[in-house]
Amino acid sequence: MSIRKGNRFFKILLISFFSLISLVAIVFFTFIFPRRTTPILMYHSLSESEEKDEVISLKLNVFARQMEYLSKHNYKIVSLEKLVEKMKEGEKIPDNWVVITFDDGERNFYELAYPIIRKYRFPVTLFVILDTLEDNERYLTWQMLDKLKEDDLVGIGSHSISHQPLTLLLPKQAGEELLDSKLILEERLKRKAAFFSYPFGATNNLLKEMTKEAGYEAAAGSAYQRGEFDDKDIFCLKRVFVSKLSSRPLVFKFMLSGYYLPTRELILKVLNIKTPRQAQPTLENYFD
């Protein structure tokens, strides 16, 4: 056997092994393990253009198909506020509950996502970056937020002022990002900003306490290594990043199952992958 053929055989064997492990994990969590998390879907950006190929961007027709699927298949779309209230009460959360969130506040939320959200009357929480809320081509403006706030379907929360990973900032700077963004939002919109979304999902125990002290009722994160944060921690609500893989119907169904996050977090732990990769602390003395 030549070296080239040997390398090819090894690659095929490796891919087959990891595919088998992934299949076993999916079967295990789906049929043996109890339901673990309520799906909080995390969207970012939508696009009508085939040319836009950003990791965080989803095609408009895919998003529309997903919302139609939720509407037709007995899912109950609830607000983030309603989910947090249920978690605080310690009650069992119905298996068909799903929450929809959007991070960053790109203009295409207003132009593309919002009409579909309104069509199905789905509640959604929009997390905006304060520094972007001026006249620009990519992000929402204060004028657009003023219109959105009039619809009870749309909750508006903070995604910080500058969208820097808070784990990489000094405590004073992180505190300002948390508190000032909340105060500015509430002053400009005349509406309570109850929820915060950590930029890049980057958080830790100290930041969670600071978020609570800033007056937020809960905060949204991402996916982490299994056991890193408690599933019932309302100041680190774990979310399902709706990636381009969700364009495959079976993948989207798995994301809605409640087993997607436990599976993903277990894989992150087994492979010792730190998340988010863009925001690993370099100031451990400040954020232990």
Image (cartoon, helix red, strand yellow):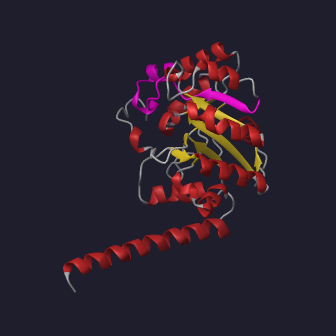
Q: Position of residue 199 (x, y in %)?
A: 49, 34
The answer to whether residue 159 is above or below residue 269 is: above
Q: Position of residue 233 (x, y in %)?
A: 63, 41
The residue nearer to you, when weighing 62 against 29, is 62
Does residue 5 appear to the left or right of 187 in the view shown? left
The residue nearer to you, when weighing 182 against 149, is 149
Q: Answer whether residue 230 is visible to the viewer in this image.
A: no
Q: Quadrant of residue 146?
A: top right
Q: Is residue 163 magenta?
A: yes
The answer to whether residue 73 is above or below residue 120 is: below
Q: Quadrant of the N terminus?
A: bottom left
The answer to whether residue 135 is above or below residue 251 is: above
- In percent of the image, x 71 and y 19: which residue is there? 191
Residue furthest out toward the top: 187
Q: Quadrant of residue 88?
A: top right
- In percent of the image, x 49 and y 74: which residue is there? 20
Q: Position of residue 249 (x, y in %)?
A: 62, 61
Q: Answer whether residue 9 is visible to the viewer in this image.
A: yes
The answer to whether residue 94 is above or below residue 121 is: below
The residue nearer to you, when weighing 256 against 213, is 256
Q: Is residue 196 magenta?
A: no
Which residues, given as a range, are shown in magenta?
A: 152-176
- In percent of the image, x 53 and y 28: which residue is there? 139
Q: How many marks?
A: 0
Does residue 146 appear to the left or right of 52 in the view shown? right
Q: Position of residue 218 (x, y in %)?
A: 65, 33
Residue furthest out toward the bottom: 1
Residue furthest out toward the left: 2
Q: Quadrant of the C terminus?
A: top left
